[in-house]
Amino acid sequence: MFGNKMNAVEKAVKKSNAGVLVGLAGNGDLSVSLAAIEGLGTVGGQAASNYLVTRLQSEEPEVRTAVAKALGKIANVHTKAFLAAQMNKETDPEIKEIMREAMVNIKEY
């Protein structure tokens, strides 16, 4: 089952299908979820950005890290405010630094 979900992530990335990736990003298997979040960073676009900002406040540090990296890769100026807000709340110094690095990739608005 795990392999099938990972294959689905790969196929969705190849087809730039953010909708499928959003569905897989909510998967109960953390590995599948993280792969889908990374895929959303690769695919980009408004649907990917909209979903990713909703996951910035995840309780799971791995998810917050993956989301910050994906948002930095997308570099959508509209998501910069969400990253900044979460960065102010973030208590993990490593994740905070990843969020700062992601914000550097996003052009000023």
Image: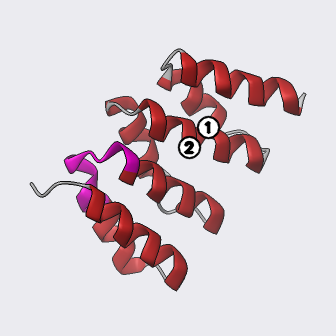
Q: Residues within 10 Å of mark 2 (few under 14, many from 20)?
A: many
Q: Which mark is residue 36?
A: 1
**Residue 57 percent across, percent down from the top left:** 49, 63
Lateral position of residue 109 relative to residue 102, left or right? left
Q: Are marks 1 and 2 in contact (CB under 8 Å)?
A: yes
Placement of the N terminus among the 4 image quadrants: top right
Q: Write the residue at 51% across / 74% down.
A: 95
Residue 39 among those drawn in magenta: no
The residue that mark 2 highlights is: 38
Q: Is residue 42 left or right of residue 59?
A: left
- Vertical position of residue 93 compared to residue 21: above or below: below
Image height of 32 relative to 86, above or below: above
| Residue 12 % position (x, y) | 59, 20
Side of 24 where 13 appears, left or right: left
**Amino acid on which the number 2 mark rests in the picture:** Glu
In percent of the image, x 55 and y 32: which residue is there?
22
Q: Three-letter amino acid code at disc 1?
A: Ala
Q: Specify start and end residues of the magenta stretch as a single range.
A: 73-82
Q: Position of residue 29 (x, y in %)?
A: 79, 44
Few, some or many C-alpha atoms within 10 Å of disc 1 (few <14, some 14-19, many ≥20)? many
Which is the main secondary structure of the residues drawn in magenta? helix
For residue 52, above or below residue 63: above
Instruction: Compute the Cα span from label 1 to label 2.
Output: 5 Å
Give the residue displayed 72% in from the left and 39% down from the top: 27
Q: Is residue 11 in view from this perspective?
A: yes
